[in-house]
Image: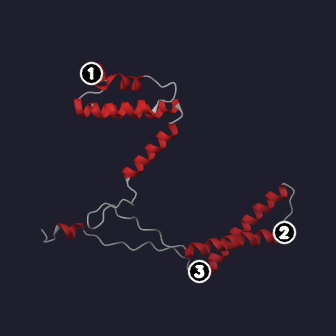
């Protein structure tokens, strides 16, 4: 057994950022760039001549070569990839600017609800099943049953407005007041 503390075991060294792979020969890089520009020129000229257009080959080649060189220059000048921020700062305060799984899930739900806002069919296909899962989980955690295992008790606990919302497909967009009342009743159960 060693005399290492838990801090020593959990401590890790920061890894250096990965280095960009560089060709050892600048000539090889230039030859590759020229070959790609020539291939793009050939394909472009073939396509243009197919439709009856005549463009000078040198101009097309120079354009592709300039684009490829510009791409290489900007790739070399690009800043390194940003370091992923920590969710917790050293002082224990939560970093609200960092992207986390809860924020992603809430954003996904906002998108789903916004899409289903004016479409009753989408509301029935997407929102109602998810709301039903939430209701079943709430009933299971608080009371030990789900809507499927004991529908009579579930209906009594949920009351008629929430029960009808979950069991009857919407023919038109539900009113926000109805949904708010259903959510309030769900929170009470």
In this rendered view, identify the residue nearer to me: 38 or 184.
184
Q: Left of 186 or right of it: where is 174?
A: right
Dot 2: what SS?
loop
Quarter of the image that includes the C terminus = top left
> Is residue 16 visible in this depiction of the protein?
yes
Dot 3: what SS?
loop
101 shown above or below 127: below
Say whether marks 2 and 1 touch (CB < 8 Å): no
* Residue 56's disc number: 2
CA neighbours of label 3 inside 10 A, class few (<14), some (14 to 19), many (20+)? few
Find disc 3 in the rendering and name its residue. 25
**Mark 3 or mark 2, whichever is nearer to me:** 2
CA neighbours of label 2 inside 10 A, class few (<14), some (14 to 19), many (20+)? few
In this rendered view, identify the residue nearer to me: 165 or 48.
165
* Residue 153's disc number: 1
Residue 2 x/y as whole percent: 14, 70
**Mark 2 or mark 1, whichever is nearer to me:** 1
């Amino acid at each position: 057994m060693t005399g290492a503390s838990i801090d020593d075991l959990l401590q890790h060294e920061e890894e250096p950022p990965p280095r960009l792979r560089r060709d050892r020969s600048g000539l090889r890089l230039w030859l590759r760039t020229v070959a790609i520009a020539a291939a793009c020129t050939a394909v472009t000229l073939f396509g243009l001549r197919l439709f009856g257009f005549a463009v000078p080959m040198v101009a097309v080649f120079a354009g592709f070569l300039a684009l490829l060189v510009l791409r290489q220059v900007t790739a070399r000048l690009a800043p390194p990839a940003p370091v992923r921020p920590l969710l917790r700062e050293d002082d224990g305060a939560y970093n609200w600017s960092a992207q986390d799984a809860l924020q992603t899930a809430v954003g996904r739900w906002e998108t789903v609800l916004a899409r289903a806002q004016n479409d009753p069919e989408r509301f029935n296909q997407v929102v109602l099943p998810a709301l039903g899962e939430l209701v079943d989980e709430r009933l299971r955690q608080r009371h030990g049953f789900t809507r499927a295992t004991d529908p009579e008790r579930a209906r009594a606990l949920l009351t008629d407005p929430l029960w009808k919302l979950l069991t009857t497909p919407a023919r038109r967009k539900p009113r926000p007041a109805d949904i708010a009342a259903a959510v309030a009743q769900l929170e009470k159960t």
